[in-house]
Amino acid sequence: MAAEEDLRVVCTRPGTGLGKAMRALLLLLWFAARGSALYFHIGETEKKCFIEEIPDETMVIGNYRTQLYDKQREEYQPATPGLGMFVEVKDPEDKVILARQYGSEGRFTFTSHTPGEHQICLHSNSTKFSLFAGGMLRVHLDIQVGEHANDYAEIAAKDKLSELQLRVRQLVEQVEQIQKEQNYQRWREERFRQTSESTNQRVLWWSILQTLILVAIGVWQMRHLKSFFEAKKLV
């Protein structure tokens, strides 16, 4: 797999005004480049899945195109029309929210209703080995999340918006997406806190249980030794 775009978010230490400003700036930069473009190779029956963390009520658009390796030219060429892709998307609760067959080049869209990790899987819908002829299929995939999935040129033409109105709408939608992401991070933090508290409680009860078992074994050993000495008339 080779990535055409890579993005890493660096966390700063909380507690200072500079740190808060840096976090806000990084969050804005992250949303400015929210999306992933890559290509990967799959075989005829192979299935590739990707995990995307998505807030709730967020639109996701995926664009893809396929290329088939040409052994004579020794390069990848656009796939034949008879070769298509099957796209399946599952939410964090493992419910299928999209399952559809597309052509060799297409676009899929879905909206998340549950925050968390969504699984996006693609595999070839072809069962004709002659299409592959033992070769590999290259799939170019571009996933856009949130307001970056909107086509603002189309929106401006449809709603007859001026450049200023369009820019204001973009900023409003960016702020809304940032709020969704912040809510998602709070939700993750709450889940992590609940998991930590549950783990701590289990560790506490396990420690108490171990202590009770050790005390019970100690009492039993003392009574057993006492009865042994009494039977031998040593006490």
Image: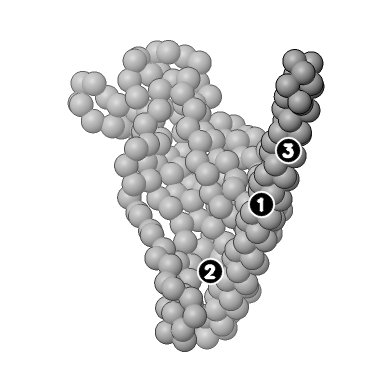
Judge depth for marks 2 and 1 and give the one in front.
1
Q: Amino acid at mark 2?
A: Tyr
Q: Residue at x 54, y 35 (%)?
A: 121
> Residue at image x 43%, y 67%?
11
Residue that badge 1 annotates = 200
Q: Amino acid at mark 3?
A: Val
Q: Is 198 on the left-hand or right-hand side of 157?
A: right
Q: Give the total number of marks visible in the rendering.
A: 3
123 and 66: which one is in front?
A: 123
User: Neighbour class for label 2 at 10 Å: few (<14), some, many (≥20)?
Assistant: some
Give the crowd class for mark 1: few <14, some 14-19, many >=20 residues within 10 Å. Answer: few
> Which of the two residues, 210 or 229, is positioned nearer the viewer here?
229
Residue 42, can we see it?
A: yes
Residue 227 percent coordinates (x, y): 79, 22
Q: Is residue 61 above or below residue 98?
A: below
Q: Which quadrant of the rendered structure holds the N terminus?
A: top left
Residue 231, by quadrant, is: top right
Residue 204 appears at what percent x and percent y?
69, 49
Residue highlighted by disc 3 = 215
**Left of 199 or right of it: where is 75?**
left
Up-down relation of residue 74 to residue 174 (above or below): above
